[in-house]
Image (cartoon, rainbow, N blue to C red):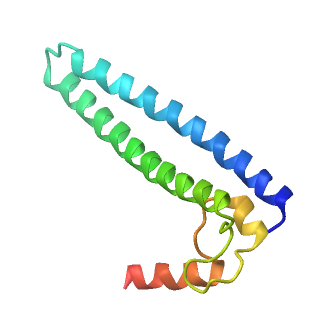
């Protein structure tokens, strides 16, 4: 992969990383505020519990994406970015534009998804 392409993806990944860190911080602040509320009725308690579960699920998904981004940034630093972890062929540029932290090419991703669903 060319230096300009690596720089392009590094900027995208770092920008997304900043956004995720802000999101996680915001979710954690909101969860702390929700837990500090004095709830007097079961409806309020159920609503807060439901909101907490949704916020926690979103936070967990964002933390997973953050880990994937950190791996991708490390690969850029070590000049291993854009190589499929399964077949070791280059991951297509268009695929990386859609998911810059992809670890599999399209063909291998389908194989992994099928084996995970089996």
Q: Which quadrant: the N terminus?
A: bottom right
Residue 31 placement: quadrant: top left
Toward the front, the furthest residue is: 78
Q: Which quadrant: the C terminus?
A: bottom left
Q: Looking at the picture, how far across and down is residue 95, in whole percent?
A: 71, 68
Residue 91 placement: quadrant: bottom right
Q: Looking at the picture, how far across and down is residue 109, in whole percent?
A: 56, 78
**Residue 6 in the image: above or below residue 88:** above
Q: Is residue 53 left or right of residue 102?
A: left
Q: Looking at the picture, how far across and down is residue 45, in whole percent?
A: 19, 26
Q: Is residue 108 left or right of residue 9?
A: left
Residue 100 visible to the viewer: no
Residue 118 visible to the viewer: yes
**Residue 107 in the image: above or below residue 80:** below
Q: Is residue 102 left or right of residue 48?
A: right
Residue shown at 35%/40% (left/top)? Answer: 54
Viewer-closest of 75 and 63: 75
Residue shown at 74%/60% (left/top)? Answer: 97
Residue shown at 44%/29% (left/top)? Answer: 25
Viewer-closest of 48 and 89: 89
Q: How many marks?
A: 0
Residue shown at 18%/13% (left/top)? Answer: 38
Residue 49 placement: quadrant: top left
């Amino acid at each position: 992969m060319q230096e300009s392409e690596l720089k392009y993806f590094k900027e995208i990944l770092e920008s997304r990383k900043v956004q995720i860190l802000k999101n996680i911080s915001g979710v954690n602040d909101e969860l702390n505020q929700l837990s500090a509320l004095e709830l007097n009725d079961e409806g309020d308690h159920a609503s807060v519990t439901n909101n907490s579960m949704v916020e926690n699920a979103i936070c967990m998904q964002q933390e997973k994406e953050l880990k994937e981004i950190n791996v991708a940034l490390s690969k850029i630093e070590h000049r291993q970015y854009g190589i499929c972890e399964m077949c070791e062929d280059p991951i297509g540029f268009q695929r990386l534009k859609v998911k810059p932290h992809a670890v599999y090419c399209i063909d291998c991703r389908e194989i992994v998804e099928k084996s995970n669903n089996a």
